[in-house]
Image (tube, grey):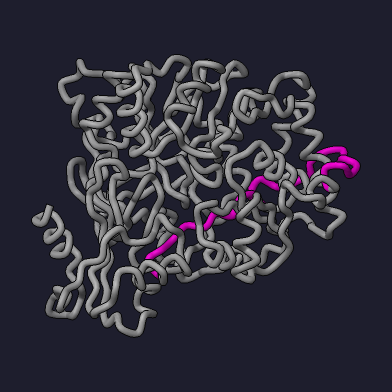
Amino acid sequence: MNLGNWLQRQAQLNPDHPALFSGRDQVADYAGFHDGAARLAGWLAAQGIAPGDRVGIFMKNCPDYLIAQYGIWYAGAVVVPINAKLHGREAAYILENSETALCFTSPGLTEALKEAEAPGRFIDITGPEYATALAQPPIAAPAPRASDDLAWLFYTSGTTGRPKGVRISHRMLVDMSLAYPVDVDFASAEDAILYAAPMSHGAGIYNMVHVLVGARHVCPVSGGFDPAEIFELSRHFGNVQMFAAPTMVHRMTAAAKAAGETGEGLRTVVYGGGPMYLADITEAVEHFGPVFVQIYGQGECPMGIAALPRDLVADRSHPRWRERLLSVGRAQSPVEVRIGDAQGNPLPAGEHGEIMVRGDVVMPGYWRNEEATAKTLVNGWLMTGDMGFMDDDGFVTMQDRSKDMIITGGSNVYPREVEEVLLTHPEVREVSVVGRAHPDWGEEVVAFVVGKVAQAELDALCNENIARFKRPKAYVSIAELPKNNYGKILKTELRKMLEESQ
């Protein structure tokens, strides 16, 4: 089952239905969307791209992102989505590790890859080569693919400091998409999905179910998150659905209150990717009404672990509505979720342990990383690394993250990635990176540094090696890092120091 079939079927049934938009301007109907993907697939085949080969997309949000994605699938190849906010060197590692021979890019990012000496060819969507590709004869139909064939190779950071490639099959994306109208939100041809968060991640992965139903796909002209632009486009299109990180929800509410916006036309905001504070979601529902749905997932089980539907997010009549609103919801249809002890044995309701999940939306493993796969998939269960508990009604509450991950503005930052860069400075003897609460971004990155180094030097070092959102917002000079008897750095003590200073 090739996911590209969904686009072809929609083009056959509703060729004139509006499909792709840049702001208010229509770029393509479904016939044009299909035609562009089919022509791009023909060009890819002519370049020697065979079924199963990896093709990268390192682009900011725009309609051509979807044309490139479906063109890759039509050719039977595998999409390697790369967050446009990553540093060129980080993107280069992903291209090298995935053995990607060709990558579609957008202006500015092409140069970043070249400066990082990334491998392979780069096809800028504003350049003549891309125009030539779209002028090639279209293929007749998407290449046949088995359900378990690789469709999406998503790189998620890990505690090793190097991102790991999550193998995501066509079956996983089909099951996730078909669960959407059951567990998350209904979808129809009258909808418009607005891509205000990176299309390489949660926002973009919901495109499939909206292609299936023939909805409109809207990319803001800004290419990103701008509350004023979101409100304007929502009024214009109506029936707008979008994905947002909790920090985006917080900023949207503040912006709407300041500007007198009501969220007219905004039908659904699916939020996830980080902790949502009770005060923030309560305030958002009070202002916008019952438009919010929470999902819980991770790269290894994309958007597919649990969900809290709009009626439960908005409900204030249940005696335990606060506890439910603090949860991440109940298990989605295609998976089983349980709480396990250190050995993975199931724990009774209310007991704290690791959140575990199994089902057809769970990855078969990491890309060419058997050691990491063996640690993460245990006896058929995905060990999420997230700690929490489940109540008697099946609601899962995530209490903390066992991997010390920092979530800033909806983007994941793993401390060791930053620490390894800072430790390359000859004057830095030791370093430990933790998250500090931030009113707008959820968390911000703070580095405790042993060694006398100017902040400007450390900033420059980070700018040369990692994405800007991963760069510490503060550096704390410290004579010695707190450690236990085994020499392990006590990050809990560092976080306590930050809390006391605030």
Where residue 219 sits: x, y (%)?
58, 33
Q: Horizontal placement of 213 versus 127: left or right?
A: left
Where residue 304 sits: x, y (%)?
45, 40
* Image: magenta residue range: 133-160
Q: Nearer the viewer, residue 208 or 450?
A: 450
Residue 269 position (above or below residue 287): below
Classify residue 495 by image quadrant.
Answer: bottom left
Q: Residue furthest bottom?
A: 426
- The answer to if 143 sits in the magenta stretch is yes
Q: Quadrant of the N terminus?
A: top right
At x 73%, y 46%, the residue is 126
Q: Residue furthest left?
A: 500
Where residue 117 sits: x, y (%)?
64, 71
Residue 395 position (above or below residue 367): above
At x 69%, y 21%, the residue is 18
Classify residue 338 by image quadrant.
Answer: top left
- The answer to if 374 sits in the magenta stretch is no
At x 30%, y 22%, the residue is 257
Q: Is residue 489 visible?
A: yes
Residue 113 position (above or below residue 327): below
Q: Nearer the viewer, residue 2 or 41?
A: 41
Q: Is residue 1 visible?
A: no
At x 27%, y 66%, the residue is 447
Classify residue 119 by image quadrant.
Answer: bottom right
- Prevailing secondary structure of the magenta residues: loop
Q: Residue furthest right?
A: 137
Where residue 9 sits: x, y (%)?
75, 28
Total numbered badges shown on the rendered structure: 0
